[in-house]
Image: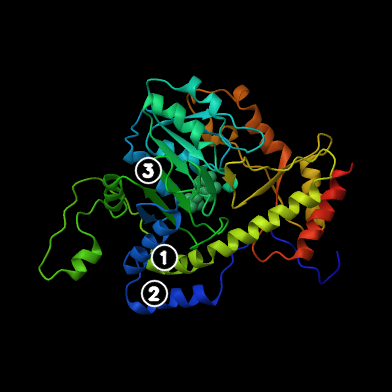
Amino acid sequence: MSEQMQNIPIAKPWMGEAEADAAKRAILSGWVTQGPEVAAFEQEFATYVGAKSACAVSNCTTALHLALLAVGVKPGDEVITVSHSYIATANSIRYCGALPVFVDIEPHTYNINPTLIEAVVSDRTRAILVVHQMGMPCDLKAIVEVTRRYNLPVIEDAACAIGSEILWNGEWEKIGKPHGDIACFSFHPRKVITTGDGGMLTTSNPEWDKQFRLWRQHGMSVSDTVRHGAKQVIFETYPMLGYNYRMTDIQAAVGREQLKRLPEIVARRRLLAEQYREKLADVRGLKLPTEPVWARSNWQGYCVRLPEECDQKQVMQTMLDAGISTRRGIMCAHREAAYQIEAWSCGSDRLIESEQAQDRTLVLPLFHQMTEEEQERAIAVLTTACQV
Ligand SMILES: *Cc1c(COP(=O)(O)O)cnc(C)c1O
């Protein structure tokens, strides 16, 4: 690698003066947490995804926790989900004292295999938590068909899927409408837009939306904004156990600017993914991700499955030596020490595709500012590394 060649990161947020100005505006306004900027961000977010309401919280993990509580998940319950996800997905279930029941994934989309769900439904199943992994919509039509029969609420972990679309009754709709009961988003810097940290819940159920707003602010009956604007003295009450899951106005101000950039970001990511698809198509044995006909991914992650004879770590090292960052496939929660817990009822022999996806794939660099030249370099090095 020549001296002046820049290392290529796996991801990079796209932020600029607009975000910096927005943060400054919030700071100088005198109102820095959960105030007018949060309210405006929620409105704009709801409009973007086509949701009835959106409630901002501190991150996607806390969003998932509140979503599970809202649908009534209690200690001793079971929640069906995938092991093959960032560990926060399964963790949120355990915050409720419930047990995650892991189902295997489909090898091509890295999403939950809908045909395996029915077999693990029990009389303790309270909900299903599905993931749109790396931005690729999961097969919600097939999932909802099963869950309807058992009257199970569907929560969507849409942490990575802002800007992704699904074909729904003949129309392309944004993930987050939601198509299940509640969708949860993340604004961590590894996702497509960021507020540093941050999360959002969308739902069509006004009762749940109201509930989220109480829980995120210590279960307090009157919000700060209402009390601030009141002409008469109000004493707040605490009718329930709440949490501090607030988003700050500084974050929300940044998020509003990020949301404006989102259409451009998604278009760029789709173009970069298309170029990967075209230019890696001929690498023998390399399997590229494909979109089902009913899905449009934002390509938060572009994950390729290596040829049989390639060693994952070796390929990653070769790329790293050439200044190109990659990551191995998405983790499996059930393999972590934190998950050597009593009875998640689906044994690892039934999570073969999940384990294979972790061990045999890698995620390539893909970010808005990635240049043609950088992508060519990544493609060239990967192509060579796969020819063993
Ligand atoms: C990133 C991520 C989360 C956690 O999001 P935070 O905002 O960091 O809490 C949850 N689920 C999935 C699938 C993720 O990728």
Earlier residue among tags 3 and 2: 2
Classify mark 1: helix, strand or loop: helix
Q: Foreground residue, 67 or 94? A: 67
Q: Which residue is mark 3?
A: 67
Give the image location of residue 248, x and y in percent.
38, 64
Earlier residue among tags 2 and 1: 2
Residue 26 circle label: 2
Earlier residue among tags 3 and 1: 3
Q: How many marks?
A: 3
* Residue displayed at 68% across by 42% down: 290
Q: Foreground residue, 336 or 164? A: 164
Rendered-image quadrant of the N terminus: bottom right
Q: Using the numbered discs, state the Cα–Cα distance from disc 3 to disc 1 in whole angstroms.
A: 20 Å
Classify mark 3: helix, strand or loop: helix
Of all residues, the one furthest to the front in this rendering is 170
* Residue displayed at 47% across by 25% down: 342
Tell me if residue 60 comes above or below residue 21 in the rendering.
Answer: above
* Whether label 3 touches label 2, CB < 8 Å: no
Rendered-image quadrant of the C terminus: top right
**Is residue 31 toward the left or the right of residue 161 in the image?**
left
What amino acid does circle 3 point to?
Answer: Ala
**Is residue 73 toward the left or the right of residue 141 in the image?**
left
* Residue displayed at 56% across by 36% down: 333
Q: Using the numbered discs, state the Cα–Cα distance from disc 3 to disc 2 in whole angstroms.
A: 28 Å
Give the image location of residue 196, x and y in percent.
50, 62
Q: Which residue is mark 1?
A: 252
* Whether label 2 touches label 1, CB < 8 Å: yes
User: Label 3 neighbourhood size at 10 Å, few (<14), some (14-19), many (20+)?
Assistant: many
Q: Using the numbered discs, state the Cα–Cα distance from disc 2 to disc 1 in whole angstroms.
A: 9 Å
Classify mark 2: helix, strand or loop: helix
